[in-house]
Structure formats: structure tokens, C-alpha cells
Amino acid sequence: MPKPDFGFAFAPNRALDLSAPLLPEVQVVLETEPSIRACMACGQCAAVCTAGAFTPLAFYRLVLQLRGGDVAAVGERARHCMLCGKCQMTCPRGVNIRNAVLLMAALAPPKP
Amino acid sequence: MNASEYLPKDEVAIIGGGPAGMQTALALSERGFSVRIYEQKEQLGGHLKGWHHLFPHGVAASDLLGQLKEQVLARAVPLHLGQSVDRLQKVGAGWVLWQGERPLGRAGVVVLANGFALFDARRKEEYGYGLYPSVLTAADLEAVFRKEQPWPFGSDRMAPQVGFVHCVGSRDLKCGSPHCSKLCCVTAVKQAMAVKSLFPEAQVYCFYMDLRMHGLEYEELYRKAQVDYGVRFIRGRLSEAAPGQGKRLHVKAEDTLQGRPLHLQLDMLVLMSGMVPAFLLEQQERAVFLKEPVFGSGFVPVQGLLAAGSVVQQEGLFASGACKGPATLPEVFADAAAVAREVEQYLKSLKAVAHA
Amino acid sequence: MTPLLWKDYQKEVPDNHYFFVRSCIRQTFFPGAEAALLDILRNSLGLDVFEDRRHTTCTGIAYHCDLVPLETIMTVIARQLSLMTEAGYRHLLVSCVTSFGIYLEMLDMWQHHPEMLEQTREALWKSTRRSFELPVALVHTSDLVYHLRKPIADRSPHRLVDKSTQRALRVVDHVGCHYAKIFPAGGFGGAEFPSVLSGLAETFGGEMVDYPERRHCCGFGFRHYLLQENRGYSLSNSRIKFESMEAFAPDLILTNCPGCNMFLDRWQYTLAEMSGKTYDREGKGIPVLSHEELAALMLGRDPWTLGLQMHQVQLEPLLDKIGIVYQARQKYSMLAGAASLPGEPSVLKVSFQ
């Protein structure tokens, strides 16, 4: 019997599964730059961000997405960073954002 | 009994033998007043008896309690243990304390220091407390630390997954508790760090709405939990707990910073049950009743602007400590000193009137 | 403080004298179910249950889709109540969970807004010259079956146990959202700990399985289902439930809402077609029964008279486990004569003997 065409399809569940172990590449980032742990998602980094005015770059969100395992999106977004350093200057918790962003950007596959 | 018969102006009865009661008794005793403590349990200590160690420095709770008791004993404060005052009758300018139909004693001044109750976590039904053995309250977890009850997961679990839920029965209008219990945030951080110390491989999550690190060194503790202990803080209130696979729990929440629902399996879920009134103060003419709280009952109302201890509408009745609302131990101790000063002024004013 | 705990919550259910209103979906898709319920109540238990053929749809689905305005549904509900009043009954027995929620909602609105009740009385009088009394008890049929679970179990020749191994059958329940999520006081156990189905399954000897997505909506929705393009939304929700219950290997899904019964049954086939996946181990799907279908089977009613051949997921594996004897050849012998066998899908196996 041919497969019926229902005219609709199911959507994947968009809930994050926190029980899934951290991806090895995520672990490497967190261990190489342990100051990332200090982020409290206050958003000051994003408020001063040069790139954030034009692109979806917001460092505190990258931290959240990194832990959520969304490696491709993190890598892609981190590449918008212009390395101006304003975020690092302003971060109240002293996160080494420059290094963190470089590590994150390396997660995206290299452009041809 | 009539007014002329009895007016022991200098005798102060303190209802409650927890930290607030003991510290108030000490402060008054040091000022030369005759005080006695009425405690409904057979032992002094109140909620402090159940704690293992205290934030922010990790002092053993038994050490502090021991010191307090020692001082109370050293000053030979009379103790009426196992006596639960449920009614105060005004006689002349003083009070008679009653338990049911039995008069327990008399005093010129009564200080309510009978603290708070813990929110009954079963009322947040979606978290399954009392239904799933791996759901604990913060008080239960202290009992686990004190080795009075076992861990809810097997000893083979070296890397347990543990979640803490902040604001259980606090900031919750539907539970009749609009207030912030204010010490649950730092308690969760303290307990999360303790779990990580005992199980370094554990993954520990705190589900918070906002972190209220109001006290001295609390914020530092929060940062330490993140950086040194790897505790993960997720902004979002847990929506429900259900049985997961094996003996684990399946919990759901929203990561509000990411705008994504999330779920995970836990070996232990700790509910930060808030502080709620232990009794309802019902005031009548020349009598005060200590009754069972009802939905939406408030704490003891006091008059004045700051740190006041004088109970609204009652001459010679004061309140000290957490019966007036959530308070930390340092706040309770500071309050006890302030209340003692107010009691002293009140008694002096009575004397001044008598001499005039 | 005495805590209010829904899990301890018990609902008052009258023992007898009911005015019964049917469900559009139930009588269309599971045509034997309501007949079986009436048969049990009247003939097995000797209750007085009255039905008036003039009663209509409650228009609940159309109301939830914004197709029927509030004033209209109130008047329709008032007319059903006028039939109950005319017949001399004050206990309303409702087959459908959507309708049950609608009755609760209208009664609640009338309680809080007496002027709306007066407007409704006037609208009904002007349009039909009818008047009505409010019901004294509003009971869903699953409430009544739960209330009568012991007399039913006492008369039952079967148990929810695998006859060959004596293993209690694993049951997952799905209580319709409008049974108690909107008005928790209207149902047994409230919204968080609904006991109306779990208590029934346990009385018959089954093992209740609490699974993470137990309280998740089956995906029926209302407007979300009516348009074909939107049905993926409904399907996705059912899928979340199946994914969650799969690990617990349930023998049976038990429902009390006709819509849930329909979607938890039919979507298993649709998902199997779309993804090739079934949620049992043998590729046959997880059987779905409603409370009255389960009660009728336990009481030894014939599965085919009960209309179980109308289910998408075939019931024979469950019947075999319980040890219910059935005539395989009679499955498609309808009242009007033998029906031709339905098409056999390549997924979600069926057995034609």
C-alpha cells in the first residue's frame, strides 16, 4: 500500500534535555576557560556589544546555548564577534570573554 | 483573680525556646530582669535543632545551639519545657498564661518568640512531596546531613543528579504566602555546595526565580557555588515532578533565559519550603489567643517603624524574632537586643507611673 | 493549618437517578460505548438512568473554536437542563469531558454572574417557551463508574491481569484536560492527582504507571485539530505522550474523554505511517480503552457488540492477555450483515483471522 499523504506532519519536541551529558567539545570549552562558570546572565556584555547591534550575538546567551549543546549555533554566532573587548571590560564577574568567544567560534565548521 | 492581687511588673515570660526566645531571655536577664521561658517541646532549640551547619561560614549548628543553651543555663533562666501556651489573659497590667484550662504562670510582660512554621510542601502538589521518596524538603536534607535519615538514592550513585527548587510556598499567592522567605536562596546555595562536597561528581541544579542574596557574604557564596563547585543555576520555576526511569524523578521547567522548556532526570529533588506563620494571633479584649493559622494568615503584627517589637494594640505584649516574619539568625539576635531594650523601657515607664 | 490536598479530594456522587447526555465524538467513533454504559447501569446495577432523544450537541467544540458565541451555548445548555427538569431529574450524567467542562463553566458563570443566568432564562423562554432548574449534581460518567467500581468489580469475571503469567497489567491513564484542570473541585483527585481512572484500573487488579507526561494534553485541542494543516500540532502532542510512556511498556491506555480516546488511538497509526515507529514492542500499538469500555469488558460484554472493532489499535492482544474469549469471525459481522474486511496497513499490525 502506498504511504498516505496526511497533509500535515509532527514537530520535534523543542524541550532541552538537561540529563544528556555535555558534549566533549563543550566540556573542552568550559575546562579551557573556567571563568565562563562565573557568568550570571546579567546581560551587560550584550548591552555593550558592538556586534549585538546588528547580529544575534549576545555572549551570555552563547553560554546558555553552549551548555544546552547547540554547538553549531554557538559557533556561528560567536563568529560575529569583532573582538573589540567592551564586554570583557564591563563584565562584573570578570569572565575572560575574549578567550571564551574564540573557543566558541572554533566550534563552527571552518568556512571553505 | 483581680487586678490588685497580682502585678509582677519585673517578671517577663518568653514564649518559645528557640534562638529568638533564648537570646531575648539572655538580653533581659543581663539587664537584671527576671525572665522565664515557656517552650512547647521538651528541649530548647526550635528549628535550630534540625540544622547541620549554618550559612554563610558553615558553623556547626550544634555548636551555636550549645553555646546558647550554656548561657541560658549559666544565668539560671527558669525553663518550662513541654508547656504550650495557647492563651494570654490580661489581669491588671500583667498576664496569665494558659494551656487549655490550666494556668501555667503569670508575668508583667510577655514576649512572643515562638517563631515560624515550615510551609507544608505537600500543598505544592505538582512537586509530589510525600508521594515520591526522592523529593525532600530543605529541612529533610539537613536531617540527611545530620545522618538522621538516609540519602534517597543508592550508595552506588557516585554522580547523583540533584535539583533544588527555590520559593516553594513563598511568593505564591495561591498558597496564601505572598512574602519572600528570604533565607531559602542562601540555604539552597549552602546545601548545593554541601552536596557537591560529599559527591564531587554530582550535577547540582538550582531552579530560581531571582536570587535574593541579601545577607553579608551571601552573594560571595553564590559565586563560589558557581565557580568553585560548578552548581548550575537555572532561572525558572519547576513546573512538575513525575516518576522517571528507574527510581529517578522526571522534572520539567522553563529555562526563562533561553526561552526553552527543559526536562531532566533527578536522583533527588529538594524543595526550599518557605517560612510561614506558626500561629494566628487572635486579639480580644483583655485576652490573646494563639490559634492554628488559616489560609493567608500573616505573621505577628508589630507597631512602629523599624525593628519594632511591640505587638499592635497590646500593652505589655512584645514579639521577638521570626514570629514577625522571615529572619536569619543574625537578624534574630539583633532583634532580640532591640526587643529587650523596648521591654526595659516599657517596664521603666510603668514604674515611673507607679512612683508619680 | 489543614492543607487542601487534591489527591485526598473526594467528590460527592449520588447513588441513583440520573439524566444522561451523550457525547458527539463518543457515539460517532465508539458507537458501542454509551450503549454498554447504559446497559451496565440499568441492567447490571439496576439504576434509574433516563435519556431524552431530543437532547442535542452541547456545541462545546464549536464554542472552543469561537464559532458559537457564549450566549448561544448558554441557551443550548439551558435547553438540555430544561429537558432534565421536565423529566423530573436533578442529577446530570455527562458522557463527554468537553461537555462536562462546559456544564461546569456555565454553572460557574451563572453563579458569579446571576444576571447572565437571568438573560439565559429569558432567551430560552423566548425561543422555546421552556424553563429549567440547575442540577444538584453534575457527574461525569467516569465519576459514576469510579463511584460504582466495587459493585462492578464484584460482578466481573475478569481482572486486569495477564492470565498466563498472573502479572498485573500495566495501565497508563490519560484524564481529559477539561475533567479537572479547569475546575479541580469538579473531579476526583483534582488536577494533579486524578484518581478517577487510576482507581478504576487498580480496582480491577491493574498496575498504575505514573509517567512523566501523564498530565500533558492528548493534543486534541479544538481549533488546532479542525483544519487539516493544523493537525500536526495535535499529533505532536500525542507523540510527546507516547514517547514518554513507551519506556514503561504499558499494556493499556485508559481514558475518560472521547476526544482523548480517539486521538490516542488514531494517532498511533498516523505516527506509524509517518515515522515507522510504534510504541509497543510488537509493532501492534498500545491498546486504548475508555472507562466504560473497560468496565463493559470486565463485566464480560462481547467485545464486538461493544464496538471494539472500531478502534484503530486492535484489542485482540489485550483480550488474549486478560483471557477474554471472543469470536474472531464475528468481528466484522455487523447488524446489517457481514462487512468487508478493512484495508490492512503496512504499519501498526492488525490481525484478521
Image (cartoon, coloured by chain):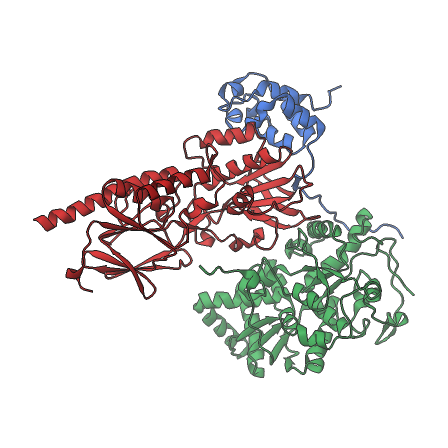
Q: Which is nearer the eye, B36 or C187? A: B36
Q: Is residue B130 left or right of residue B72?
A: right
The residue at the point 71 percent across, 45 percent down is A11
**Residue B284 coordinates in the image, percent (x, y):** 27, 61
**Residue B12 coordinates in the image, percent (x, y):** 25, 50
Circle count? 0
**Residue A14 coordinates in the image, percent (x, y):** 67, 41
Quadrant for the N terminus of chain B in the image: bottom left
Q: Which chain is red?
A: B
**Residue extending farthest left:** B356
Q: Which is nearer the eye, B180 or A66? A: B180
Res. B201 image quadrant: top right
Q: Which chain is green?
A: C
Whether residue B75 is situated above or below residue C309 in the rendered picture: above
Q: Is residue C42 visible?
A: yes
Q: Is residue C65 left or right of residue C40?
A: left
Q: Is residue B78 left or right of residue B51?
A: left
Q: Which is nearer the eye, B314 or C288? A: B314
**Residue extending farthest right:** C353
**Residue B246 coordinates in the image, percent (x, y):** 71, 48
Instruction: State the hue of chain A.
Output: blue
**Residue extending farthest top:** A84
Q: Is residue C59 visible?
A: no
Res. C267 image quadrant: bottom right
